[in-house]
Image (cartoon, grey):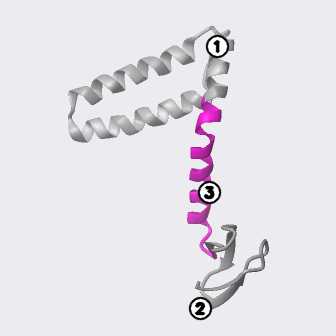
Amino acid sequence: MSGRCGIDELNIFIAVVLIILSGASYFTQNAILYAVEFLILLLLLFRMLSKNIERRATENRASIKLLSPLTKSIRRWMHRIKDRENRYYRCPRCYARLRVPRYRGEITITCPVCNHNFDKMT
C-alpha cells in the first residue's frame, strides 16, 4: 500500500453512504440499488488504491468544503442529544442560540447579545 492514497475524509463519507445504501438495498431488494451500491464500492476502492495523491487530496479538500455545513449541523445535533441537562432556544430578536438549564419550570431568559427578555418553559 505504499504510495497509495489510503483513507481520507471523503472515503469515510463514501463508506458511510455505502453502508446506508446496503441497508436500504437489503430491505427493498431493488436491483438498481444493488448496481448503485456496486458503483460506489468501485469508487471507494479506486480512491483508496489510487497513486495520484495530489488529485485525491484536491478532491478531499473540495468535499470537506462542500460537506462542512452538514457535518457541523450533525455534530451540533449530536451534542444536543447528549446534553440532557440543558435546553437550547433561539432569541426571537437576534436569533442567537441560548442554553438554559432544564427542569426549572417557566423562566425568563435574557439574551446576552441583545438583552431581550422572553419567557420559556424548560
Which is more toward the observer, 4 or 21? Answer: 21
User: Residue 85: where, in percent of width, then height?
Assistant: 63, 76
The answer to whether the residue labelled 2 contacts the one labelled 3, judged by CB atoms less than 8 Å apart, is: no
Tell me the amino acid under the disc marked 1: Arg
Check disc 1 and report the residue beneath it.
55
The first of marks 3 and 1 along the sequence is: 1
First to last magenta residue range: 63-87
Which is more toward the observer, 114 or 119? Answer: 114
Q: Is residue 74 magenta?
A: yes
Q: Is residue 59 above or below residue 104?
A: above
Query: Residue drawn 25% across and 27% down?
Result: 32
State the quadrant of the C terminus.
bottom right
Badge 3 crowding class, 10 Å Cα cut-off, few under 14, some 14 to 19, many 20 or more, is: few
Residue 96 occupies which quadrant of the picture? Answer: bottom right
Badge 2 crowding class, 10 Å Cα cut-off, few under 14, some 14 to 19, many 20 or more, is: few
User: Residue 86: where, in percent of width, then height?
Assistant: 64, 75
Q: Is residue 5 above or below residue 31?
A: above
Query: Residue drawn 69% across and 69% down?
Result: 94
How far apart are the alpha carbons under marks 3 and 1?
31 Å
The first of marks 1 and 2 along the sequence is: 1
Q: Main secondary structure of the magenta part?
A: helix
Label 2, secondary structure: give it: loop
Check disc 3 and report the residue beneath it.
76
Q: Is residue 111 above or below residue 35?
A: below
Label 1, secondary structure: give it: helix
User: Residue 121: where, in percent of width, then height?
Assistant: 57, 86
How far apart are the alpha carbons under marks 2 and 3?
25 Å
Badge 1 crowding class, 10 Å Cα cut-off, few under 14, some 14 to 19, many 20 or more, is: few
State the quadrant of the N terminus.
top right
Tell me the amino acid under the disc marked 3: Arg
The first of marks 2 and 3 along the sequence is: 3
Label of residue 105 in the image: 2
